[in-house]
Amino acid sequence: DIQMTQSPSSLSASVGDRVTITCRASQSISSYLNWYQQKPGRAPKLLIYAASTLQSGVPSRFSGGGSGTDFTLTIGSLQPEDFGTYYCQQGYSSPFTFGPGTKVDVK
Amino acid sequence: QVQLQESGPGLVKPSETLSLTCTVSGGSVSSGAYYWSWIRQSPGKGLEWIGHIYYTGSTNYNPSLKSRVTISVDKSKNKFSLKLTSVTAADTAVYYCARVQDIIVVIDAAQGVEWYFDVWGRGTLVTVSS
């Protein structure tokens, strides 16, 4: 199985800050990497697929990058509604696996 | 807009079978454009993909659960279902159903298939306890 790791495990930032979350795969997954946002008591919501393609309806302050084994999710200007936990997921090969999550608090 | 809704018992006894159903509305499980998946989330193991099914009945399961999992589809009722046998406390989790997209990605003339989950149900908590 492809193992996914994320850093940091949690962060706290102020409104307007630029926030970057990193995801690393245990082997190359090309650009087959997806990002989700989850709020407490809710299902994960797809933000970005194929490493950098924004899902329809997702604000443009979210962006993704990277390829191979190292990827980033950037929130260009953090908003109060961006609190939650962010997960990466590799879509390269079955079994599809998720990272452990990065919890984002807004100060 | 497609919506998914999980249903089934919230409490299952150890060694018994967990059974859940996902009802699809605003879309069709018979659409050849998508697969249909089950994913679970527990505090100890995070998000775990269980498996998925195509409308033809073709399935793909996580090897870690394969011996205990069956996913089936009922096209007439626009539903798909999960059965997990011989459950233990470790199977206690929130279970989600989700729609799966598989897209062709071309990078530097190399083509491949990328898989992601674009629509999720709200999730249902299943507790395994006597």
Image: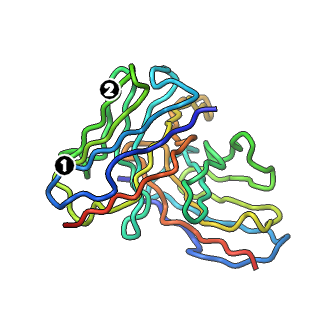
**Residue at 70% in and 79% down:** A12
Q: Picture quarter containing residue B73?
A: top left
Disc number for residue B58: 2
The residue lying furthest to the right in this view is A16
**Residue at 32% in and 24% down:** B57
| Circle count | 2
| Residue B19 on image: x %, y % | 28, 45
Compared across the picture, whether A69 is left or right of A79 comes to: left
User: For the residue labelled by badge 1, is the local secondary structure a helix, a strand or a loop?
Assistant: loop
Compared across the picture, whether B121 is left or right of B89 comes to: right
Residue A65 drawn above or below residue B52: below
Q: Picture quarter containing residue B60?
A: top left
Q: Which of A50 and B13 is in front in this view?
A: B13
- Please give the chain letter of the residue carrying mark 1: B
Q: Nearer the viewer, residue B105 or B78?
A: B78
In the rendered structure, which amino acid carries the disc numbered 2?
Answer: Ser
Residue A63 drawn above or below residue B71: below
Closer to viewer: mark 2 or mark 1: 1
- Please give the chain letter of the residue carrying mark 2: B
Disc number for residue B4: none
Compared across the picture, whether B79 is left or right of B3 comes to: left
User: For the residue labelled by badge 2, is the local secondary structure a helix, a strand or a loop?
Assistant: loop
Q: Which of A55 and A53 is in front in this view?
A: A55
Category of crowding for the residue at label 1, using alpha-carbon neighbours closer than 10 angstroms: few (below 14), some (14–19), many (at least 20): some
| Rendered image coloring scheme | rainbow
In the picture of the structure, the residue carrying the numbered disc 1 is B85
Q: For the C terminus of chain B, which image quadrant?
A: bottom left
In the rendered structure, which amino acid carries the disc numbered 1?
Answer: Thr
N-term mark: 2 or 1: 2
| Residue B97 on image: x %, y % | 44, 43
| Residue B127 on image: x %, y % | 31, 62
Residue A42 drawn above or below residue B119: below
